[in-house]
Image (spheres, grey):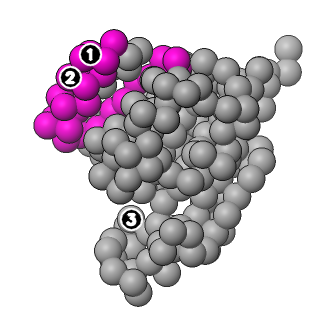
Amino acid sequence: MKTSGTLPPGAAAFQGAGPSGAPSSWLLDNRDLLPSAARTLDVACGRGRHALMLAAAGFPVRAVDRDAGLVEALSATAQRLGLPLRAAVLDLETGTADLGTEAYDLVLVFNYLHRPLFPALLRALAPGGLLLYETFTIEQARRGKPTNPDFLLKAGELRERVAPLVVLREREGEFEGRMVAAVAARKPQDRS
C-alpha cells in the first residue's frame, strides 16, 4: 500500500477546525504511514477535526458519532466545502456496532474508549490497513477529566487491545499536557 508522506496544502485549512485546535499530534506525527487517498473511518469523530483535514487532503472519509448535532454540523460543513466526507449518527456503545468488514485502509480513534468496540475496529480494517488510536490513561484522572476508569487505559493495555495488529509506533505518557497512550498499528496482509 502506497503511503502519502505528507498531506496536501488544502488539509492545512482545517488545522484549527477542532474543539482543541489542531488535529492530534499523533495523527500528524504518523502522516508518513498514511496510505495514499485511504478509505478512512473516523470513529467518535466529534466535531470532525481529523475527518475534515483528511477529506480536504482527498481521503474519502466516513465519520461516525452518536451526537446527532455534531454529525449534522459536520455533514453541512463537508457539503458546503465539497469534501468527500459522509458523516453518520452511530451509537458505538449500544449492541454490536457494525463498522464494516475490511472496508477501510485507515481507522482513526482519538479521545474515546469503549473496550467492546475493539473487535469491530479490527474487523473494519482492510488487510494492510492502519489503525491510529490515542486516548487517555488512568494517570489522566489525577489531572482532571475523564476520571471514570471505563474510559481510561491501564499501562500497556492499548498494545494488548489491538493484537493481532502489528504495532509500528507507540507512545505512552504526557503529551500536550495530557496523559495518553497511542498506537499506530497495521493489519497484516492476507497470506494468499
What residue would you read off at disc 3?
A: 151
- Amino acid type of the residue tagged 3 in the rendering: Phe
Q: Crowding at label 2, few (<14), some or many (≥20) Cα neighbours within 10 Å?
A: few
Give the answer, above or below, for where 24 lies relative to 135.
above
Element assignment for label 2: helix
Q: Position of residue 162 (x, y in %)?
A: 63, 49
Q: The C terminus appears in which quarter of the rendering?
A: top right
Q: Position of residue 144 (x, y in %)?
A: 33, 80
Residue drawn where x is 48% and y is 60% of the image: 135
Residues at marks 3 and 2, CA–CA distance in whole angstroms: 30 Å
Residues at marks 2 and 1, CA–CA distance in whole angstroms: 5 Å
**Mark 2 and mark 1 residues within 8 Å of each other at the beta carbon:** yes
Element assignment for label 3: helix
Q: Give left or right: position of 139 versus 49.
A: right
Residue drawn where x is 30% and y is 52% of the image: 19
Q: Earlier in the sequence, mark 3 or mark 2?
A: 2
Whether residue 134 is visible, yes or no, is: yes
What residue would you read off at disc 1?
A: 79
